[in-house]
Image (cartoon, rainbow, N blue to C red):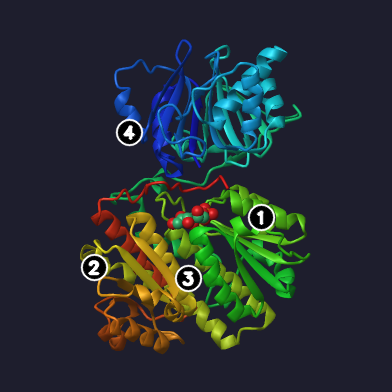
Amino acid sequence: MCGIVGYTGPREAYPIIIKGLKRLEYRGYDSTGVALQNGGIKVYKKKGKVAELEDTIVGKDLHANTGIGHTRWATHGEPSDRNAHPHQSASGKLAMIHNGIIENYNQLKQELSNKGYTFTSDTDTEVLLNFIEEIKSNNNCSLEEAVRVALKRVTGAYVILLLDNDDPETIIAARKGSPLVIGVGKGEHFLGSDASPMLEYTKEVVYVNDYELAIVKPDELILKNLGNEKITPYVQKLDLELAAIEKSGYDHFMLKEIFEQPRTIHDCLRGRLDAMAGTITMSGIQQYADQIVNTNRIIMIACGTSWHAGLVAEYIFEELTRINVEVEYASEFRYRNPVINKGDVIIAISQSGETADTLVAIENAKEKGAIILGVVNVVGSSIARTSHGGAYTHAGPEIGVASTKAFTAQLAVLTMIALKIGYIKGTIPQERYTQLLKELEEIPEKVAWTLQHSESIKVLAEKYKDARDFLYLGRGYNFPVALEGALKLKEISYIHAEGYPAAEMKHGPIALVDESLPVVFVATKDQYHEKVVSNMQEIKARKGRVISVITEGDENAEALSEDVMVVPEADEILAPMLSVIPLQLLAYYIGVAKGCDVDKPRNLAKSVTVE
Ligand code: F6R
């Protein structure tokens, strides 16, 4: 979490940094700060969002050609002015920003305290910075050398950017476990947690790898490993346009991203799915096709919404490939002692490709001989690079903190993988295969149809916005959709919501049902439909308020519901890509109706790069 930006070159650094931080606020937004080289390092920082910092430093002399900036998601130390980054070293000569966690900071702090250091913040960052300064002055060495020595003692994850009073045009940067992109311009360099802060200035970027250190000057970029050996920077062309990271007239990124789904799913299928020819082309899967077809089990590893996509995929894979599938929370999996056999296939699902728990879980599995396939949105991200193969979801940048378009793109990719493997394995009857390919191709259109009904969902949002709790129920393919609907509502509107398998409701949650409880059924037409309708009867009999996502024309379910949200008919395997859409909209509109900051819900960050 946390967003970092840096600039060194002939332009004014401050506006570039501020604009960059606003684009990175999805990574954290509880405090903000900048450090500028303006005849000595000047630091401005404040609790709150970037705009709040801007307001408080109006009128200051912000002229500088080199600077760094930070937007924070607190780990060590509450959100406050003094815990905001950048931090300055005890001498005031160094300033540093940090994304990540220094796990052994207590030990380092103790060592420094014994030498008489005192600290002005509660952060691990200030400890690391003073540790670096201590090494620099003890060894009388360059900052670069001091950083290298210090990082060899550090356990944890970091991206750090440092400024030095004595070398005002240089930014020293280093990375392990958190993302760092360097934009290469003409006589200037940009640094960011992702490429968004530099998009309008350059399309040439270098993705810094773990254990690399960068010495960044206006006209020079030197990359080294921690052993002080030079590495040739691998400059890549960025395939991202500015429009992709702007709101394009929508009130919020979340709404824009919900409405983008017909296109993002289409982009995800394009060039891969050819229903006429009956083919699915996925080169990153094809090269491991033999191993996948012959594996005894697939383990899906993910967190949050991506984990829900894994749950849907479990049903799809088991149905279409007859391979045993397990779905794991990365955060649990990595700390267990899971049985992983050589040849097991791991599918890591992640929008950001930077989720720390998922990354470590797959690294552990890789060491034990598993084949790692990434289903990742962010190109060049850590999980994508750690995976042996896989497929990108091509949903474009997802900026709203609540995941929407990434989820449906994950489902589209996972469905294609299951279809491809099932077809090779011979576990899908030809007729069904052909029909599913054809129907999958029609999904973007059906999503567009569903979105046309957004106004009626807005009305429902007004009606139900004051409910204290919600229950979301579904069966089969729609059970994970119920979980996802509940997650969306709680993160966006702060209303307590629980997702449950509809049949399990009788084993406990039914005790919650009374006339004040909205119960959202994900009840599209599938093999479980009649049973879900019986569950609706049970809720209705207890005076619960039934709201349902139903297939168009399902009068039976409609008659049992106080309100309905309608989706077009689709094969049950593909239905989650449709049934989740009204739930995304419901959460969004309730969040807006309650006055919540839906793009930046409290306490959350888009990319969870700490464990
Ligand atoms: C929920 C949400 C999170 C993420 C989770 C995993 O709306 O966005 O639950 O799904 O943090 O993130 P990725 O997919 O980036 O690994």
Badge 1: residue crowd in 10 Å (few <14, some 14–19, many ≥20): few
Q: Pointer 1: what residue?
A: 335
Residues under numbered marks 4 and 3 in contact, where contact means CB atoms less than 8 Å apart = no
From the image, state whether disc 4 or disc 3 is nearer to you.
3
Which label number is shown at residue 31? none
Vertical side of 262 occupied by 501: above or below: below
Residue ID at (65%, 28%): 108
Q: Pointer 2: what residue?
A: 460
Q: 589 or 450: which is nearer to us? A: 589
The Cα–Cα distance between marks 4 and 1, rounded to whole angstroms, is: 39 Å
**Where, by quadrant of the figure, is residue 103 drawn?**
top right
Task: Look at the numbered disc 4 and give the secondary structure of its residue.
Answer: helix
Vertical side of 361 occupied by 162: above or below: above
Q: Pointer 3: what residue?
A: 480
Q: Is residue 16 visible?
A: yes
Q: Pointer 4: what residue?
A: 51
Q: Earlier in the sequence, mark 2 or mark 1?
A: 1
Amino acid type, mark 1: Tyr
Amino acid type, mark 3: Pro
Residue ID at (55%, 26%): 126
The Cα–Cα distance between marks 1 and 3, rounded to whole angstroms, is: 24 Å
Residues under numbered marks 4 and 2 in contact, where contact means CB atoms less than 8 Å apart = no
Task: Look at the numbered disc 3 and give the secondary structure of its residue.
Answer: helix
Residue ID at (73%, 67%): 344
The Cα–Cα distance between marks 2 and 1, rounded to whole angstroms, is: 42 Å
Q: 104 or 42: which is nearer to us? A: 104
